[in-house]
Image (cartoon, coloured by chain):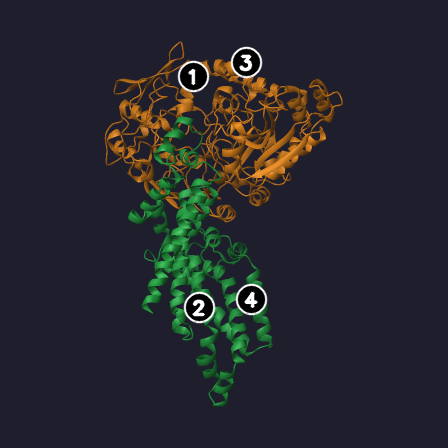
Chain colours: A green, B orange
């Protein structure tokens, strides 16, 4: 197990290096616009552009630029400064992480609380009205883009522009430590908007897995031994059926921690996703690069954790 | 050109795309206008009835918190680096340049004690500053001319990266300055600063002193940070020294900003009333949501672009909360330096064939502007001298829907007797792939094909369009139909010089996309810029506009308008020159 973890850790490092090299090449050596011009702001004169090119080291060979870039990241965790507003990218990402983490884990709780029971009920009440309504609803939820769903929720339920004034609207996000009550209230609509499609997907996935597992011999054996149905499902069937869910969940969390761009944009939640969106819109290369690397880091680490967890959940997994 | 707030995300360098808000040609009969009835300095903007009262005097009261919301965040709150429409709202509330515009667009002495003194040759400008303006805590000292001198020095510091200093501050010794002393700036005493210019430019230079780059900066505070790239005076705006009625208390880039009163601000030295005690601004909002929140709220000002559906809704049912006023122009450039459009009559034919009404519809209809007949727009005081909305009467611009008869006349004059282009040149049209760029490319292509041109359309990302196509002279792009311009200040110099002067052409990041380099026009621009009398200078620039329009380097598409919305009871005051709210005049009550 120890050797497996070490080997996987080394692969994580290699993968992050590859990601950093690819993003560096894309954003600095094959850019759609000259980074020096972007940094120089609007209407710069040629002398200013050249001076900034020199300051940024863009007049150096590519390998020197990459070396400096990686040196900054590894030694100082320095992702440079935003071309748009001159703020340090690292500071911007870290200051926005709490909002993204709040949004992600709250949504995870919501979609698991909705998706798992619905999936189980649909599987064990297969072809009943409950199953058909659940799966029909799941199809709708999967089909609804989060951006659209977010706007609909706001126009229906937000306490400023909604038809019925129930929930806090967009732009009300407050930090957990500043005011836990407002934090919770401001995130309710975003959690539901973000969780809707995930809950639907998880319900469908669990239903399918559970139906497969319920046909296995060991389930028939468990029933033949006279175990109560609740125990058959809870202890034997679910353990096997939920394993793929854990895999997907880990990756989904990793992706969302890299930024739930659309949800954060609609609800004006100052998270990493909104930062990435602004970076893309403004061709702010250091911000794009920083958020991409952070996103990659979260996904790789989440994948790593999932692999480890997988082994515990399913003893058939081998580490060789 | 400063970047407008609208879609600034996809705008860089100098070509701009403005508001895509509008009503699809429906709605009211008006085109654009200052709805307050508060005459802009151009005096030419038509009004639509029943719009929001955005005049300077609405019976405001002191006190309370003014709330703002935007989609976009701030770029640079350093007075030396600031060059963005919504940044200016903050800059003019917390800093005092030598001069600034009041809401009606009149130049007012701000830090300056009175009008600038311009020497007879127009090459020396002397400004006396008020002796009793103090910096905010913790500096707490009186502003001197040395602080203004340092502000200009740092405008040329690459770490500050000012976007306009090289174009407007034509001061002796500035061209090679990199943040150090500039020989052409002297301070004979603590309240006097003298600018020695490289050419006769005094009248125009004084106008450019309204930009935030002339606001004082204490060297002892900013100097150490100015040695870093980027300067920490920009990255930490709460640590600046303020001279305006407000100070930046808190700042989260792209998210929130809070202004509070500057205890060292003396209202007897200022024309600003500074009604609100506190100003809270939240950025990052979805524009659809933010504009609806604003319309539903009593005390909220939205300081950036209102999406088309909300403009329509506000126009129909909440007109008292909607303000529409002119800002900048759009045009489609025709490259005058390479065939086929190095032929002036061919260009005139293309302009004549263009359906300029189509451009207006593509941008959103009547509430986003009006069809242009020349290049200086209604937001500029020279507009009335340039024939106003009717323009100069050129036949190739007479029919806004296009006139093939006139077009064929010019085709014949260009050497194509059949009225159709029979040459070998293939016309490359490059534009932004963001809406409405593709529509504008199709409109220009349609006109060109009607004249027999073979065309290729190339939609590209906005940044790429600037850096690798339209702004890159050697790319020789024939037509760039998604160009636009917002002047930096109310002098026509900032409307016409950079986009149409041959002397402003640079190999990369070029803004003169038509690559127009007409010696007569260049000379007329230099002559106009040297005139110190304001009225005569405006008339001279109107004549330059006529010369440019006559040579048809571009199809004038529209003079655009900008729509703003406000809460139901907030007293929002519009800055005509910046076409956005003035925070020192607006009030929550």
Work out whether disc 2 and disc 4 sit on a shared chain: yes
Q: Chain of mark 4?
A: A
Asked if the residue at tag 4 contacts the one at tag 1, i.e. Cβ–Cβ closer than 8 Å, the answer is: no
Report the residue marked by disc 4: A138
Q: Residue furthest top?
A: B120
- A143 left or right of B509? right
Q: Nearer the viewer, mark 3 or mark 2?
A: 2
Report the residue marked by disc 1: B203
Asked if the residue at tag 3 contacts the one at tag 1, i.e. Cβ–Cβ closer than 8 Å, the answer is: no
How far from the left and from the top, in percent, is residue B417? 75, 20
Query: Vertically, is A243 above or below A33?
Result: below
Asked if the residue at tag 4 contacts the one at tag 2, i.e. Cβ–Cβ closer than 8 Å, the answer is: no
Image quarter hosting the C terminus of chain A: bottom left
Number of residues whose C-alpha sits closer than 10 Å to that of mark 1, classed few (under 14), some (14–19) or many (20 or more): many
How far from the left and from the top, in percent, is residue B117? 36, 14
Work out whether disc 1 and disc 3 sit on a shared chain: yes
**Is any part of residue B286 visible from this angle?**
yes
Report the residue marked by disc 2: A246
Element at badge 2? helix
Number of residues whose C-alpha sits closer than 10 Å to that of mark 4, classed few (under 14), some (14–19) or many (20 or more): many
Report the residue marked by disc 3: B520
How far from the left and from the top, in percent, is residue B140? 23, 32
């Amino acid at each position: 197990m120890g050797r497996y973890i070490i080997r996987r850790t080394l692969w994580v490092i290699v993968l992050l290096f590859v990601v950093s090299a690819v993003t560096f090449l894309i954003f600095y050596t094959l850019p759609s616009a000259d980074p020096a011009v972007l940094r120089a702001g609007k209407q710069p004169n040629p002398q200013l552009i050249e001076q900034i090119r020199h300051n940024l080291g863009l007049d150096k060979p590519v390998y020197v630029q990459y070396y400096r870039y990686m040196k900054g990241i590894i030694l100082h965790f320095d992702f440079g400064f935003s071309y748009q507003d001159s703020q340090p990218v690292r500071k911007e990402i870290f200051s926005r992480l709490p909002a993204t983490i709040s949004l992600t884990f709250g949504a995870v709780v919501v979609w698991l609380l909705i998706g798992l029971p619905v999936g189980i009920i649909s599987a064990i009440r297969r072809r009943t009205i409950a199953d058909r309504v659940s799966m029909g609803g799941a199809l709708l939820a999967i089909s609804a883009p989060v951006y659209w769903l977010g706007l609909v929720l706001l126009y229906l339920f937000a306490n400023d522009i909604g038809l019925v004034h129930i929930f806090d609207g967009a732009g009300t996000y407050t930090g957990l430590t500043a005011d836990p009550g407002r934090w919770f209230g401001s995130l309710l609509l975003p959690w539901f908007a973000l969780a809707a499609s995930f809950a639907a997907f998880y319900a469908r996935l669990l239903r399918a897995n559970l139906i497969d597992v319920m046909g296995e011999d060991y389930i028939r054996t468990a029933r033949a031994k006279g175990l109560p149905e609740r125990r058959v499902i809870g202890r034997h069937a679910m353990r096997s059926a939920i394993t793929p869910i854990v895999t997907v969940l880990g990756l989904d969390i990793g992706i969302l921690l890299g930024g739930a761009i659309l949800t954060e944009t609609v609800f004006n939640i100052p998270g990493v996703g909104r930062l990435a969106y602004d970076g893309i819109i403004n061709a702010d290369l250091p911000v794009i690069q920083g958020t991409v690397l952070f996103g990659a880091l979260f996904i790789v680490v989440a994948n790593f954790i999932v692999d480890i967890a997988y082994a515990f959940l399913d003893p058939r997994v081998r580490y060789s | 050109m400063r970047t407008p707030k609208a879609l600034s995300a996809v705008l860089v360098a100098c070509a701009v795309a403005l508001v895509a808000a509008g009503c699809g040609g429906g709605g009211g009969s008006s085109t654009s206008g200052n709805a307050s009835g508060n005459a802009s300095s151009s005096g030419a903007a038509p009004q639509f009835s029943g719009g929001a009262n955005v005049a300077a005097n609405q019976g405001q009261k002191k006190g309370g918190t003014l709330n703002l919301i935007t989609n976009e965040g701030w770029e640079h709150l350093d007075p030396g680096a600031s060059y963005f429409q919504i940044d200016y709202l903050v800059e003019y509330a917390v800093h005092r340049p030598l001069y600034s515009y009041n809401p009606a667009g009149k130049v007012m002495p701000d830090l300056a004690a009175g009008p600038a003194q311009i020497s007879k040759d127009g090459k020396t400008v002397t400004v006396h500053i008020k002796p009793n303006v103090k910096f905010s805590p913790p500096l707490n000292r009186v502003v001197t001319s040395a602080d203004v001198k340092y502000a200009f020095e740092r405008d040329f510091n690459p770490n500050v990266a000012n976007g306009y200093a090289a174009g407007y501050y034509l001061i002796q010794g500035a061209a090679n300055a990199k943040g150090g002393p500039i020989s052409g700036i002297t301070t004979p005493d603590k309240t006097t600063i003298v600018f020695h210019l490289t050419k006769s430019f005094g009248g125009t230079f004084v106008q450019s002193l309204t930009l935030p780059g002339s606001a004082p900066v204490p060297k002892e505070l900013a100097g150490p940070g100015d040695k870093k790239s980027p300067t920490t005076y920009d990255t930490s705006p709460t640590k600046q020294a303020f001279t305006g009625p407000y100070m930046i208390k808190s700042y989260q880039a792209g998210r929130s900003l809070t202004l509070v009163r500057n205890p060292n601000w003396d209202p007897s030295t200022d024309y600003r009333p500074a009604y609100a005690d506190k100003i809270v601004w939240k950025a990052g909002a979805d524009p659809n949501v933010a504009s609806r929140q604003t319309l539903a709220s009593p005390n909220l000002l939205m300081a950036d672009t209102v999406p088309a559906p909300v403009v329509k809704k506000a126009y129909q049912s909440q007109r008292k909360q909607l303000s529409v006023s002119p800002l900048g122009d759009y045009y489609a450039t025709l490259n005058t330096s390479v065939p086929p459009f190095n032929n002036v009559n061919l260009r005139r034919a293309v302009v004549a064939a263009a359906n300029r009404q189509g451009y207006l519809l593509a941008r959103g209809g009547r509430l986003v502007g009006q069809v242009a007949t020349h290049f200086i727009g209604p937001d500029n005081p020279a507009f009335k001298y340039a024939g106003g909305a009717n323009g100069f009467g050129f036949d190739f611009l007479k029919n806004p829907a296009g006139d093939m008869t006139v077009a064929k006349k010019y085709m014949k004059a260009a050497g194509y007797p059949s009225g159709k282009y029979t040459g070998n040149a293939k016309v490359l049209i490059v534009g932004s792939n963001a809406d409405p760029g593709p529509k504008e490319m199709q409109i220009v292509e349609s006109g060109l094909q009607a004249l027999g041109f073979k065309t290729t359309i190339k939609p590209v990302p906005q940044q790429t369009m600037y850096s690798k196509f339209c702004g890159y002279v050697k790319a020789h792009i024939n037509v760039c139909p998604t160009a636009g311009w917002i002047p930096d200040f109310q002098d026509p110099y900032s409307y016409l010089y950079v986009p149409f002067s041959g002397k402003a052409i640079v190999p990369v990041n070029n803004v003169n996309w038509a690559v127009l380099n007409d010696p007569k026009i260049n000379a007329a621009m230099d002559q106009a810029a040297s005139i110190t009398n304001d009225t005569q200078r405006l008339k001279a620039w109107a004549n330059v506009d006529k010369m440019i329009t006559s040579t048809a380097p571009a199809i004038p598409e529209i003079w655009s308008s900008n729509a703003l919305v406000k809460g139901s009871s907030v007293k929002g005051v519009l800055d005509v020159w910046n076409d956005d709210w003035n925070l020192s005049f607006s009030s929550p009550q």
